[in-house]
Amino acid sequence: MVRDTVLILENDDDSRKKLAEMFRDKYKIIEVSSEKDGVDILRIHGATLAAVLVNLIIPAKDNFQILKRLSEKRFVNRIPFIMITDETTAEYEKKGYEYGIVSYIKKPFNPGIVRQLVDNVVEVFQYKMQLELTVKKQTERLKKQNVMLKMMAERQKRANEVLIDSLSNVVEFRNLESEQHIKRIRAFVRCLGTSAMKLYPEYELTAENLEIIERASALHDIGKIVIPDNIILKSGKLTVDEYEVIKSHTTKGAEMVDRLIRIDNVQFCEYAYDIARHHHEKYDGNGYPDGLKGEEISIAAQIVSLVDVYDALTSKRVYKAAYKTDKAYQMIMNGQSGAFSPKLLKAFTEVRGDFEEIVEKYRDE
C-alpha cells in the first residue's frame, strides 16, 4: 500500500491550515484537532500515512503524555512522528526523542525548511521500511531453504543408513553372524562412548560425533566380504597363513571405505575408515594391522575394539559357544582378550549393567 498521506494533529486552527497548505500539492492531507480523532485516523488509515505532524496542547495534559499513549498503541513504531513546537530547550527535545519522534518542526514555520524536513523524514523512513521488508522476505526465503535442506539432509541420512545396514547385513550373512550383531555393536558403542565422554573430556567426544561413530561402527568388519568362505566359516583352529588372511579384513575394509563408500559426510567416512582399519589394534601395541600403541589408537577405534571383543565373547560363533556376561567382563578386565586402555576399562566398568541389558535385549534367537 502506498504511503501518500500526511496526518496533521494540531489543535491550533491557523497552524494546522498553514501546514496543510505546505504539503497539499505533494501529499493527501488529513487534519484533526483532537487526540481521539487522531487515534481513529491512525487505526483506519495507518498503512497509508507517510508522516504524522503532532502538536496537541490540551489542558492538564502535554504532548509527551499523548506521545506515550500513541507509543503504547505502537503507532509511533510504524509511522514517523514529527513534533510541532515552539520550545527550544535541549531537555525538551531529548524527551521527545525518547518517546520515539524522529524530528521537530519549529514555530514560527519556515515553509522551505519544513517541507524539506518532512520530505527527508518520509524518504528515510520509507527506505527503512522497504529494507526491513526485503530483509523479512529474504529471511523467510532462507527459512524455507533451510527447511528444504534439512529435509534433503534427513533423506540423505536415511539413504546412508540403508546403505550401511545393507553392507553390514552382507557381512553378517557371509560370516554366519546373527542379524542382532550390528544392533548390539551400535548399542554398545553408544553406551561405552557416552560413559567415556562423561569421564574423560580430554577425548573431546560429543553427542554429535558419538552418533557418527555409532553409525560408522556398523562397517567395522566390512572387509570380511572379501575373505574366502573356507577361512571365514572354518570351525577349527586357523593356520598361520589363514590367520594372516583373516587379519587382512582390516586393511581391505579400510580400502573399501576409502574407494567405494560414497557418503556425503567426510567425518563419517574418516571414522569408518579408521574403525575398519584399527578396531583390532591393542593398547600395548600387540594388535594389527599397524601395531599402534596407547593413544596412537583413536578413541573411536578403541571403543569399537572393546565392544567387538565383548560381543564376540558373549555370542555363539562357528568356532565357540557364548560365554556368560560375567565371564566376558572378567576376561576383558583381566586382559585375556588383549590390552585395553585403563581409562576405557573404567568407562566399561561404569556401564557393565547396561551392557548386560543390551545382550538380553538383542539376544540371538
Image (cartoon, helix red, strand yellow):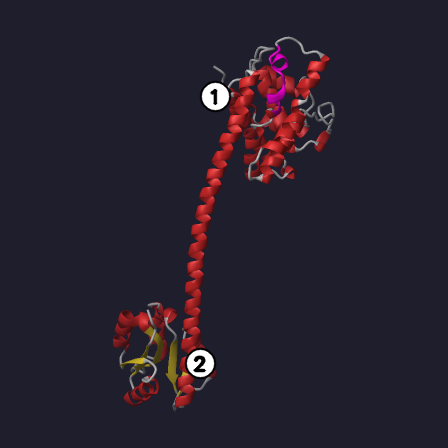
**Viewer-proximal residue among 94 and 251:** 251
Crowding around mark 2 (Cα neighbors within 10 Å: few <14, some 14 to 19, many 20+) is some
Q: Which residue is mark 1?
A: 361
Residue at 44% in and 70% down: 128
**Viewer-proximal residue among 234 and 47:** 234
Q: Amino acid at mark 1?
A: Lys
Secondary structure of the residue carrying numbered label 2? helix
Q: Give the distance between the C-alpha atoms of the residues marked 2 and 1, in whole angstroms.
A: 75 Å
Residue with the most extreme top position: 236
Residue 118 occupies quadrant: bottom left
Q: Which residue is mark 2?
A: 93
Residue at 73% in and 27% down: 290
> Residue 60 in the image: x percent, y percent?
30, 80
Query: Start and end of the magenta stretch?
Result: 223-234
Q: Say above or below: 219 vs 113.
A: above
> Residue 326 in the image: x percent, y percent?
58, 16
**Labels 2 and 1: the sequence-earlier one:** 2
Secondary structure of the residue carrying numbered label 1? helix
